[in-house]
Amino acid sequence: MTDVPTIDLQNLERAALDQIDRACRDHGFFLIVNHGLEDHLANLQTEAEAFFAQPMAVKRKVMRTADNPMGYYDRELTKQKRDLKEVFDFYAPRTPGSFGRMPWPDDASAFRETLCDYFYASAELSQRLLKLLCRTLGQPENSLDEIFTEAPTSTARLNHYPSSDHLEPEERAKVEPLGDVALGHHTDPGAITLLYQDDVGGLETLSQEKGWIPVPPQKNAIVVNVGDVMQVWSNGQYKAAIHRVVPVPTGKSRYSMPFFYQPGSKAVIEPIASLGPPHYRPFTWKEFIQGRIDDNYANIGEDDIQVDRYLIAS
């Protein structure tokens, strides 16, 4: 078994399920191929490169805010340090053709269509993968279906990691300093994350056995990682993936496109009952995700909320 296994979704034999299970118990990452999203990924890469190549003034026309955390942002914090990246956060409405509160760029119909198509396809794939993870936990495939009966709060993102600070010197003086890495170590709050990354590399995950290990780029592969609420659902058997992005080599840019599969806002998160005495007390997804969002915009003087807060004392 490799550190981060590659799983062929068209060949899910017992050995593949065992690989997923071992990876989720150690570091929370695996790759999937033959997933059906290959054309979406190629189109998404093209649109991401074109969007981030625009002048800063154009991108900031769709700047996100604390009131509407969708759109462009270029000074996000992780662990109270500024990331060396710029992002475009988005979602696709449940009713295709509507816009909701999503601030799409002007005259960007191809951009919007490409991102929405990717979003819908990723949501369907995430449903399949959630059922697969229930199987690897030895549970019925539908064990978590009711968590997603209310409208999910899933979101997606385009990431651009330059090799040097993209903010002007006068702007840098007004914000938090950069961290030692391009993206500081963290876990994703939701159920699972699907990530397409280009061939530049730099993504690493923390293995309990081996320390920091690379999550290697692989053509047409999608990276899957376990999030915080999956750790709770599994009663701590699966580990929310601690991961980071190391700096991009000088003169290069790195692009990645994550899809965050997340429950409905009113969902109550607690361990699956059949997985033994619960190690976590119940909490709402709305409560938890708000605690994770709050420190993206300003240094609140403490680390963002973690699922350990809900551990039941032994």
Image (tube, helix red, strand yellow):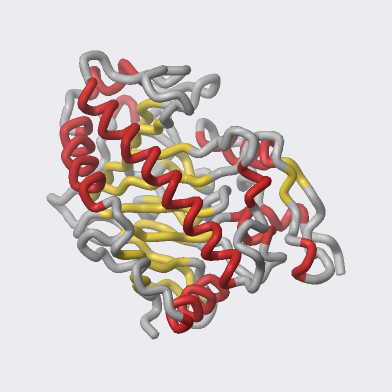
Quadrant for the N terminus, please.
Answer: bottom left
Image quadrant holding the C terminus, namely: bottom right
Image spot of residue 156 (x, y percent):
41, 39
Whole-percent x, y for residue 189 in the image: 57, 48
The structure residue drawn at horizontal position 33% and vertical position 46%, both measured from the top left corner, is: 257
- Residue 214 appears at what percent x and percent y? 34, 70
Relative to 156, say whether 38 is above or below.
below
Q: Write the residue at 73% across / 41% down.
A: 284
Q: Is residue 283 left or right of residue 161?
A: right
Q: Position of residue 213 (x, y in %)?
A: 39, 73
Residue 164 position (above or below residue 247): above
Q: Measuring 51% from the left and 39% from the top, which residue is drawn there? A: 154
Q: Which is more toward the observer, 111 or 290?
A: 111
* Quarter of the rendering containing residue 139: bottom right
From this viewpoint, which residue is outermost toward the left?
Answer: 251
Q: Is residue 310 above or below residue 211?
A: above
Q: Does residue 301 appear in the picture of this structure?
A: no
1 vs 25, left or right, is left
Q: Quadrant of residue 84?
A: top left
Which residue is rendered at x = 41% and y = 17% of the image? 98
